[in-house]
Amino acid sequence: MILLLTPEESFVPFLQGLVGDTVEISRKWDPAWRDAQPIEVVQSTVVPVPDVVIVGPTVPESVALEWAGAFDREHPEIGRLIIAPATPDLLMGAMRLGVREVVPPNASGDQIREAVDRLLGAAARLRSAMPSNETASVSTNRVISVLSAKGGSGKTVVATNLALGLNEVAPGGVVLVDLDIQFGDCGSTMNLEPEQTLTDAALNASVLDATTLKVFLTPHPSGLFLLGPPQSLVDAAEVTSQQVKAILDLLVGIFEYVVIDTSSGIDDHAITAMEFSTDLVLLSSSEVPSVRAMSRHVETLDTIGMTRQERHFVVNRAGTRVGLRTSDIEQTVGLQACVEIPSSRQVVMSTNQGAPIIHSAPKDPAARAMQELVDRFVPEQAEDSRAKRGWKGKR
Ligand SMILES: Nc1ncnc2c1ncn2[C@@H]1O[C@H](COP(=O)(O)OP(=O)(O)O)[C@@H](O)[C@H]1O
Ligand SMILES: [Mg+2]
């Protein structure tokens, strides 16, 4: 369906003649929009959600750009076409907003039809790649970065299990991004060998869109998608923060959950990941160096202003006789632990076998703790529907 925002009633039969009778066109216009915020225009026109929105003709170019920007933020999956004189300002603004189609009002019918066809084609391809509506309705988008100050804290184990657990709730709606740029091992932890990696996506970042980005993802049999890490340190060095930003920007528009595994400490890519994140999973094991380092890590997050995200402090390998008590860890770090993952041989075995514990040994106490973490990100509605489907993950 095409949503047409223009005061020009006569444009409807003209456009219908170009695209054919099988494509529904819905024209909407309200003079009150002149004083409305762009987001209000989006909200009042976007039900039902169209495949393509066309702004113009005879909508001022600055207004058309503002609306296209608001559609981009609220519904990046909708293709956008602006019909307005192609001034340099309009073209620059359109490029910045990723509006790929701009045609002048005096364009030929063929030019307009071709632009609309391209957008409808892209919308159809994206729809087939998108998670189903059922899953789309159960949660709001979350971007979750898994971080720790020290290596070996269990980031990769937690990120892979978290992503797989969330994928049970939103099948096909979850992507795991391995941003441990030099030594990423999410693939082997899940028995996947990505043919395309972050480097391949990054080198194409400037021309990627939501549809083409899918080519670089590796599907896990569960329906989870992985964006695999560079295959060598040389490949890793080619990836810039700008490219990672462009990729995350697209992924956030496509997937309900983006889970990001990081390397230890706070490098450029971790900062990029955090900038996109709604949630931070902060991991520490229960040994003194790890706890002290996490305390400094949290202090640094405060110092650099990374305070907007919800923090979830997780103590890994908790409760061992030789480890610190959780209450002491909490006091040192200054955060309350929301989940404690016990030390478990099953975790090591599952890592070595490439079969994450949440699937391979769901009854293991460590798997139950992982599930507890997953549940923190699941809205109640989804938990209900999961319970109705008889899903066994819940204790
Ligand atoms: N709760 C746990 N019990 C036992 N072993 C664990 C646990 N958490 C992690 N491990 C093991 O510790 C190692 C490091 O974990 P990993 O997730 O790779 O850490 P990171 O990504 O933070 O460097 C892996 O071999 C993993 O199997
Ligand atoms: Mg790791």
Image: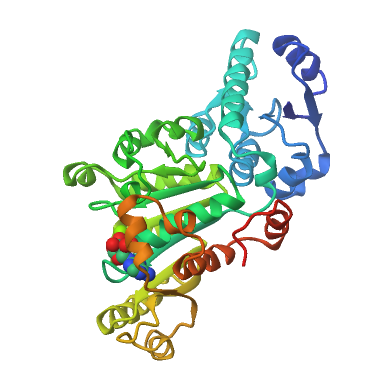
Please identify the quarter of the rendering in which residue 287 is found. bottom left
Please identify the quarter of the rendering in which residue 316 is found. bottom left
| Foreground of the two, 238 or 25 | 238
x and y percent of residue 107 in the render? 61, 13
Please identify the quarter of the rendering in which residue 301 is found. bottom left
x and y percent of residue 152 in the render? 27, 67
Assign the C terminus to one quadrant of the image: bottom right
Assign the N terminus to one quadrant of the image: top right
x and y percent of residue 111 in the render? 59, 12
| Foreground of the two, 261 or 76 | 261
Where on the image, by quarter, is ligand 2? bottom left
Q: How is the image coloured?
A: rainbow
| Foreground of the two, 344 or 161 | 344
Q: Is 335 located above or below residue 15 in the figure?
A: below
- Residue located 66% across and 45% down the image: 136
Q: Is residue 369 left or right of residue 346?
A: right
Q: Is 320 located above or below residue 111 in the figure?
A: below
**One can see residue 345 in this view:** yes
Q: Is residue 73 left or right of residue 272?
A: right
